[in-house]
Image (cartoon, helix red, strand yellow):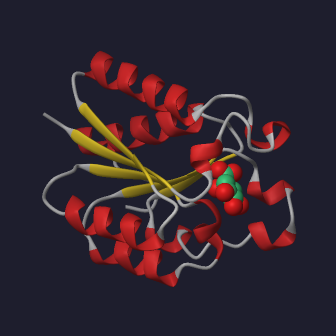
Amino acid sequence: MRKFLVLHGPNLNLLGSREPEVYGRQTLEEIDHMLQEWAEQRGCRVDTFQSNSEGALIDRIHEARDRYDGIVINPGAYTHYSIALRDALAAVPVPAVEVHLSNVHAREPFRRHSVISPVVRGVIAGLGPVGYRLALEALWAELDGGGSAGA
Ligand code: DQA
């Protein structure tokens, strides 16, 4: 059975109440529920994990080797400066997709730069919670042999 790991970075536990005009009103629990429904439809497994700590996210990426077929990660603010998170993704041979709820390119200039993007298959930004599902679909298509533009 195919297995996917969805990682939510710092402050995403506050979704629903955190700047709803930017991040929407869906809670993290609701988003994870939607992903479980997707997993049921596909007949695969999706494990979700949120942490406000860089180290905990890195540990989960390390553990993903040989255990998961793909990783979806919203690194939150770590996107913009965590070389450690980038190195972890580069070190583990599991394809990953970066997701942002908001359109980071339409916001403050410091959000336009991602240190994560060069080491993932692709990036989805600005589409809200559906972005996570689209990322899983992309990983699924790649496993089916659909490839990715860069592969
Ligand atoms: C975010 C965008 C980041 O810039 C921000 O720090 C977040 C959330 C997003 O999902 O839009 O925490 O990754």
Q: Quadrant of residue 63?
A: bottom left
Please give left or right for residue 32 compared with residue 1 in the image: right
- Residue visible at 85% across and 70% down? 109
Q: How many marks overall? A: 0
- Residue visible at 40% across and 64% down? 57
Please give left or right for residue 142 compared with residue 137 in the image: left
Where does the C terminus fall, quadrant-wise?
A: bottom left
Q: Quadrant of residue 91?
A: bottom left
Q: Is residue 34 above or below residue 141?
A: above
Where does the N terminus fall, quadrant-wise?
A: top left
Q: Is residue 136 above or below residue 74?
A: above
Ligand 1: which quarter? bottom right
- Residue visible at 25% across and 69% down? 62
Please give left or right for residue 84 compared with residue 88 in the image: right
Q: Is residue 10 above or below residue 147?
A: below
Q: Position of residue 71 (x, y in %)?
A: 35, 52
- Residue visible at 64% across and 44% down? 14
Please give left or right for residue 19 compared with residue 27 in the image: right
Q: Position of residue 54 (x, y in %)?
A: 47, 71
Q: Position of residue 99 (x, y in %)?
A: 56, 50
